[in-house]
Amino acid sequence: MATQSEAQLEDGLIGRLGALGWEYVAIRDEVAQIANLKVQLEAHNRLTLTDNEFARVLNHLDKGNVFDRAKTLRDRYQLTREDGSVVFIEFMNVKEWCKNRYQVTNQISADGAYRTRYDVTLLINGLPLVQIELKRRGLELKEAFNQVNRYHRHGYPTGRGLFQYIQIFVISNGVNTRYYANNRKQSYKQTFTWSGENNIPLNQLSDFADVFLDKCHISKMIAKYTVLHEGDRQLMVLRPYQFYGVEAIIDRVKNNPAKGGYIWHTTGSGKTLTSFKASQVLTEMAEVSKVVFVVDRADLDYQTTREFNAYSEGSVDGTNNTNTLVRQFTDEHTPLIVTTIQKLNAAISKSQFLERMAPLRDRRIVFIFDECHRSQFGETHRRITQFFINRQMFGFTGTPILKVNANKSEAIARTTNDLFGDCLHSYVITDAIRDGNVLRFSVEYWGKLKRRDGSLIDEKVAGIDTREFFENPDRIESVVDWIVVNHDRKTHNRDFTAMLAVGSVDALTQYYDLFKTKREAGLHDLRVATIFTSASNEDDKDANGLIAEPEFDIPIDMHNQGHSRDKLHSYIADYNATYGTNFSARDNQGYYSYYKDISKRIKERERENFNDRDRVDILLVVAMFLTGFDAKKVNTLYVDKNLRYHGLIQAYSRTNRVLNEVKSQGNIVAFRNLKDATDEAVRLFADKDASETILIAPYEEHAAKFNSAVAVLLMLVPTVDSVDKLPDENAKLAFVSAFRDLARVRNVLSVFAQFKWSDLDLDAQTFDDFKSKYLDIHDQARKRDQTENASIINDIDFELELIRQDKINVAYILQLLTNANVGSTDRVVRDQRVNDILNIVASEPSLRSKRELIEKFIQLHMATLSASKSLDEEFKAFWHSERENALEAVCLEEGLERKQLNHLMQLYEFTGQTPEREDVVGALTVKPRILERRKVIDRIVDKMTSIVRTFDSDTGDV
């Protein structure tokens, strides 16, 4: 049987959509698209528009970027008609989402940088709101994702930009189907599989279409379950388990107001977005008086405040003032309250607030608790149930308290079910790993460590919990030495942050002081930050493996805690000196501000404009940040602390947020024997056979996998030179796929402490030589992408982040050139060294745009360098001169004012965002015609980004 073609897949899908009630309409270009839009808007709004009136509607629609247009879609346009009357034009009915007009078309073409044709487009009221890109069976699904990205560059902004109204993309090769919001910043890792309520994926396009592309369902996803994130100005669409979790809560509130329940969605699966959307939807229900979303104070940090206020401006009060909370409770215009468990407790227990709160006792109030496994919830739960007669309570947790892991020290060991009721929906860690929504863990156990004299320190007894053994100075120094040696490997040359969790404040101070002493001695340059309180709960005295709750009230007057308090002050002073801040732990508010700054500093590493000098390499903690802290740029947890049950899963899960291809797993390095505890926790929160799903294979298996990939590669290209002789694009495509598979395995292997090239069937030099050929093909594909000569290689994801070496930058190359030039009287030797350096440049993705410049400097300056000038000075002067020439050339070619261009460049380098269209036009000495503007602006922005990529990115101190 022949493989189904892309055209057959497309025809089959259109037929299926027709059966679902989508009306087929033939639209081949923008002219026909606009004509159809007029007809559909008129029918939806039950009116007829004159040509002039519709032109004004069209002008209103043709404003802003994707985010702006998403707002326009959900709003109504006030149109003053030619007869003077006023009507409001609705573009989509988002309240009764099934009451819209539905069409399907295919192969709409657009003339942008080159002609593009889109596969299947779903129109709602004439606007293209869902775009489906297909690849024939057998092709990699990521090719469809990359094709959409190419359309973003070359097609969607053209003409009236109606395709910028797309809300949801669907990509499929027939057997695998995924969807995602129209958000240019996300990677393929942020695409989702739809599933049934039982979390079984609907991968086949036919199954997916029947459920997800049902008219009412897709309308509901756009109208109700697509979030406009004001902070990042991006669209976010809920994943299936988030959808089912929210729907389950809504159903319980509508149909069973006497009962609550909880949602079990694994740590790292996006509970904040789910709980927010549940809170927001409930506020729209007439039967609900108020919705109160409750977090622990530790979680109401920079990120949560920013996200909730981005979803619903002004919903979060980040102060410690309970008066503000009481005022929100009594304000009829505040349907959604976001508060802390501490303030809620005060509002219903302290006498000064009870009189004002009394009228609310009989009101229908829904409480939603984030991370409801928190231990301090028990007391507040009792007070809420006693105070609010007509309340309904729901909880979200990634690690529920079950009978096995309930706190046995309490008089009554209460479970999550005891406090909230039934589990309304579950999505456990095995589900999330299968769907690619969280990463697996690589767990290494290092029980045997060496003293400086070479003798072994051996944890001989499994589960040993004596502090005398674990806090022995020799042992702690041995752990520090291990981390110093292996940290760059674990974090991909410090591209990620690691956390070090220890068993007590006493151990923490030993660790911090050792890191500091060794740094001052020049033994490492790691940036270590720490935070703890001197309260007794920051201790592991009972060694029960459950993480204590962080406390923000500093016990300043506790004399027995004086030593650790003084240490904390000195560590904050170190932090201030490193980052230019001015924090203090003299009072609770100052201490809390310090906590929030650490949180923000680590979380913001994932932002494009983050400055690397602001990074934290290792965050040293006892209990803080081990629960609820969500940072994609954390990939490693060093553990010298007993962990069990939900405490273990919560701590491990700090590392497994999905980011990109480089972050292939969360790295756990255990300096205690946690093997049994890990297996026990996996069994409890997944199932007894889940270890292979949650934990990645050991080093030996990955080495074998690498060698198998080498064999496949060498069958295609026996030598590096064979790559140049590949006969056609299909052969090149096969090489790219084979080498990329090899690079993926190498990426995982490289973080293992025992990694050695001698274990593998390919040496490092040959790998780098193949990498250079791989990059040559990438560069050729990129050049073709700028022309109409599209290639089958265009949409392949080269995953360059897998082979990037962050420490190789222009400053590093300059140092190599200096070394090659100094004291080298033998021209042959020097030329060979220079040739080796150029090979390094060729093999490093971030430097390939700079190769011509570096070669030019070598040819024009190195051989004639005068004795009075250093190579370093000469190179920097050359680099600055070439950059100036490049900017002048852009001004001359495009008719730009140099001062204005400098301003645009500064803004771009500072914010990481490309300039607004109006600002680019404002920098032109002669303004282009309206029809030419988009092409001119795109060309100028491309040249600007090329200059930044060539002269400013990955340069180091040059």
Image: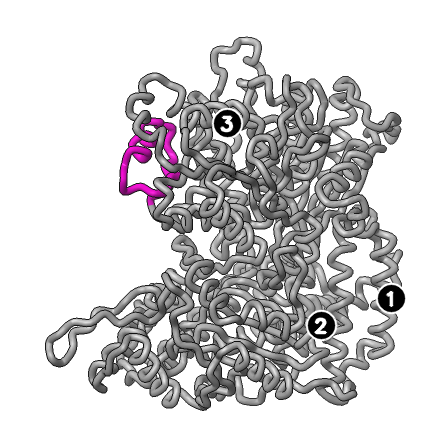
Q: Could you tell me how far apart the alpha carbons at marks 3 and 1 are, in whole angstroms?
A: 56 Å
Residue pictured at 36% horizontal, 85% vertical: 36
Q: Earlier in the sequence, mark 2 or mark 1?
A: 1
Residue pictured at 70% horizontal, 85% vertical: 4
The amino acid pointed to by label 2 is Ser
Quadrant where the N terminus is found in the figure: bottom right
Q: Which residues are magenta?
A: 314-337
User: How far across and how far down the image is residue 6, in percent?
Assistant: 64, 85
Residue 862 lies in magenta, yes or no?
Answer: no
Q: Could you tell me how far apart the alpha carbons at marks 2 and 1 are, in whole angstroms?
A: 21 Å
Residue with the mark numbered 3: 381
- Dot 3: within a 10 Å radius of its alpha carbon, few (fewer than 14), some, or many (20 or more) residues? some
Q: How is the image coloured?
A: one colour
Is 387 on the left-hand or right-hand side of 690?
left
Q: Looking at the image, which is closer to me, 694 or 802?
A: 694
- Label 2 sits on a secondary structure element that is helix
- Label 3 sits on a secondary structure element that is helix
- Decide if residue 521 is in sight here: no
